[in-house]
Amino acid sequence: MQLSRELMLRAYRQMKVIREFEERLHAEIQTGEIAGFTHLYSGQEAVAVGVCEHLTHDDYIISTHRGHGHCIAKGCDVKGMMQEIYGRAGGLCKGKGGSMHIADVDKGMLGANGIVGAGAPIAVGAGISAKLDGKGGVSIAFSGDGACNQGTTFEAMNMAVVLKAPVIFLFENNHYSEHTGVDYAVGTAGDIASRAEAFGMKVWRGNGCDFFETFELMREVIEYCRAGNGPAAVELDTERFFGHFEGDPQRYRGKGELDRIREERDCLTNFRAKVTGAKLLEAADLDALDAEVLTLIDEAVAEARAAPRPSADNVLTDVYVNY
Amino acid sequence: MATMQLREAINLTLHQEMERDPNVICLGEDLVGGMGTAGGPEAIGGIWKTTAGLYAKFGADRVIDTPISESAIIGAAAGAALAGKRPVAELMFADFIGVCLDQIWNQMAKFRYMFGGKTTCPAVIRVAYGAGRNAGPQHSQAAYAMMTAIPGLKVVIPSTPAEAKGLLASAIRDDDPVLFFEPKALYATRGEVPEEEYLIPFGHARSVREGEHATIVTCGQLVGTAEKAADTLAKEGIGCDLLDLRTTSPLDEEAILDSVETTGRLIVVDENPPRCGLAADIAGLVANKAFAALRAPIQLVTPPHTPVPFAPELEQAYMPSTAKIEAAVRAALNYR
C-alpha cells in the first residue's frame, strides 16, 4: 500500500527523534551528568515506529529495559522523558523511575521494565482488559531475543492462546542478549518465531531495519488481532548500534561489525534513500525535519539540565494511593 | 445475619463485588475447574470452593480459568489492573508466591512509585496460607511476613468468616495492590456473617479480648488459638488484651503501643519463622516506641527456624499453640 506523504513524514520524524534522543544521550552520558544504567535503542527505530504508528491510546504496549524508543513511538513527552533520565522532579515519573521505568499509562504505555521477560504476562492482562472493553484494542509485548528465553514469556504465550487474548508478542531480535549471541542462547538455532508458533499462534517474520516492511507487516498482524483471532507473534530482525548498556566495551562484536551495520542496516538512511529515490519525498523535506528534531533534542537536554532536582521529601510520596 | 463458613463468606463477597462492579474480574488456576473435561466447567468450582458459581453467573470473560502458570496469572492481574480493571487473582497456595514473586515484588508493588504516582494497580491476590492441614513444607507456609516487608503492597489476614467478608470487600475496592491471606485451616469454620454489604477498613486492629496484664498481638488463624489461651488465663485472674491485627501492612501501631502502655507486657504470636519476621518487627516497634512502658522482656511465640514439617506430631510441635502462648504470658508476668 502506498503510504501518504503525511504518514511518511511523521514516521521519519518519529524515528529521527528516537535516533537523536539516543545519540545525544550516548554523548551526554560520557560527561558523567546522568546517573544509573542506560540502554540505548539506536538502530531499532523502525520497529518501534513501524508498530506504534498503527496504535491508538486504546491499545497497550509494554516495553523493556531498552525502552526509550517504544516510549517515544507511543507518544510519551520527549522533554518529560529527558528530565526523567536526568533524574529531575519534572520528569515523566518525577525522577522515581529513571531510564528503565518510563511509563505513560494514559497513553497505553505500560512502562519500560527493568526485568527481562516481565512484560509478556503484563501484556496478557492488558489484552484481557482490552478484550473485555470490546473496542478492538490490542496489547503488545516488546521483547528482545533475551526475553524470549524467559519462562514468563512461555507462560504468557500459552495463556494468551488459551484465552484467545488480543496480544502480540513482538520479538526484536538484535542478535545479542546482553553480551551473548542469539545462536548460542536461543536453542532453536536462533529462530524465535518458530518457537512462538509452537505455542499455537500465527507468526510473522520481517526485516526490522526496514520501516516500510515492518509497517506493512504490522498492519496485517494488528488487523488480525483486532478481528478477534487471538494472539500473534512477530520476529523482527534488527540491529543494536550501541552496547547492551552505556559503557559496554562491546568486545563481543566482530571486526568492523559496528561500521557495517551502520553502513548497511540503518533504518533512517535506508528510509531516506528509498523515498528520495522513488521521488515520494524531497531530501529538503527530510532535512527540515532533521533540523527540527535536533532543535527539540537540544532544548530537551538544556531544559533537563536546568530543571530542579527532586526534594528529599519526595522519597515518601506515591508508594500507596492511601495508607 | 447468617451463619456460614469462612469459604462461603469469601464466595459471597466475590459474588457481591462482581455484581456491584463490572470491572471486577477473577482469574486463577482451577478457579472454575473442569474446563476441557467431560465433567465440564464448574465440575470443581475451585479447589477451596471459594469461587463456586461465579463462572455460571458472570461468564468466561470475567471468571478466567487459567493454565498452571503463576507468573502469567499474577502478571496478567498486574496488566489488567493497569488497564483499568479490578482483578482478583487466586494463587491457590501462599507457597506459590515463590513461583511468581517478580510480578508481585518488582512489578505491581512498584508501578505507582516508579511511574511517579501517575497510575494505580488495584489488584487483589488471594492465597490460602498456613499450617494445620499436614500439607508439608511447600503447601503450609504463612508467607505474609515476607509480603509485609515489601513497600507498595497491602497485606490482609482475616481471622473469622465475618472478618473475611468485610476485609475482602475492602481489598477489592482498594486502589493499591493487596495480598489477601486466607487461613485455609479455617475455611470450614462457621461464624455469624452479615449478608449485606460492609467494609472493614485497613490499618485498624480488632480488639478481641480486653485485659490489663498482658498484650497479645496476633493475626489470622492464630487469633483463635490466642483467644483460647486468653480465656484459660482469665480463669486464673490474668487479663489479656488480645489484638487481631487484620492487616500487617498497614500496621495499626497505635493500637499496639496504646495497649502496651497499659499492660507493660507484650506477647507477639506469629506463624512465620522467627528471623526477620512479623514478631521481631513488632517487638522492634515496641522496644523503640514504648520502651519505658515495658515491665518484662517482649515474648515472641513463633515457629522455629525450620520449614513446616508434614507429620501431625511435628506440625503441632512447629506451630504456636495455646500452651506456648500461655507459657509466654506467664513468663512475662513472672519476670521480676
Image (cartoon, grey):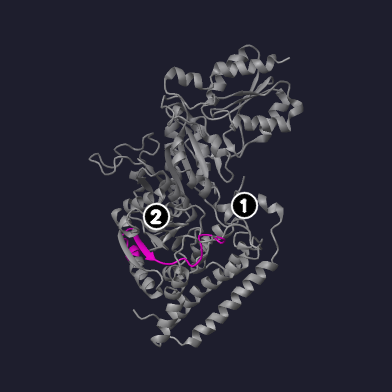
Q: Secondary structure at mark 2?
A: helix
The percent position of residue A312, horizontal first and vertical second, equals: 71, 53
Q: Chain of mark 2?
A: A
Judged left or right of residue B326, residue A58 is left
**Residues drawn in magenta:** A224-247
Residue A228 lies in the magenta stretch = yes
In the figure, A170 relative to B171: above or below?
below
> Which residue sits furthest top?
B236
Judged left or right of residue B29, residue B20 is right
**Badge count:** 2
Same chain check for tags 1 and 2: yes
Are there few (<14), some (14-19), or many (20+) residues within 10 Å of tag 2? many
The percent position of residue B129, horizontal first and vertical second, equals: 47, 32
* Residue, disc 1: A318
Judged left or right of residue A144, residue B271 is right
The residue at the point 49 percent across, 46 percent down is B102
Examine the image and state in which quarter residue A207 appears. Answer: bottom left
Q: Nearer the viewer, residue B295 or A205?
A: A205
Mark 1 or 2: the one toward you? 2
* Residue, disc 2: A148
Which quarter of the image is occupied by the N terminus of chain A? bottom left
Q: Secondary structure at mark 1?
A: loop
Residue B139 lies in the magenta stretch = no
